[in-house]
Amino acid sequence: MDAFKDLEDHKQDEIVVHCRSGARSATAKAFLESQGFGKVRNLLGGMMDWQRQFGA
């Protein structure tokens, strides 16, 4: 949990969370918002969708 404390200074910064499919990052987004983070974005579809769209 110490790493989470490092984010305190970034509560007003835009934060993009991502995971493989987008499901776990949706949970992370909801948690961060519940802790007062105001600009949290989830990469919809996760890295799998991103790779399909951009061929990386």
Image (tube, helix red, strand yellow):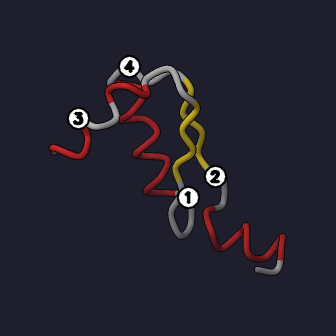
Label 2: element kind:
loop
**Spatial separation of the CA atoms under disc 2 and disc 3:** 23 Å
Residue 17 x, y percent position in the rendering: 52, 49
Please identify, in this view, whether the residue under mark 3 or under mark 4 is nearer the observer: 3
Q: Is residue 42 left or right of residue 7?
A: right
Element carrying mark 1: loop
Q: CA distance from mark 1 to mark 3?
A: 24 Å
Between marks 1 and 2 in the image, the one whose residue lies nearer the viewer: 2
Q: Nearer the viewer, residue 40 or 12?
A: 12
Please tell me which of labels 3 and 4 falls first in the chain. 3
Q: Residue at x 50, y 20 (%)?
A: 12
Q: Mark 4 falls on what kind of element? A: loop
Which disc number belongs to residue 5?
3
Residue 36: image tag: 4
Give whichever of discs 4 and 1 has the lower sequence position.
Answer: 1
Residue occupying the point 54% across, 33% down: 40
- Residue underneath mark 1: 22
Horizontal and vertical percent position of residue 4: 26, 40
Kindly identify which numbered label has been placed on residue 43: 2
- Mark 4: few, some, or many residues within 10 Å (few <14, many ≥20)? few
Report the mark closest to the observer, 2 or 3.
3
Q: Earlier in the sequence, mark 4 or mark 2?
A: 4
Name the disc covering residue 48, or none.
none
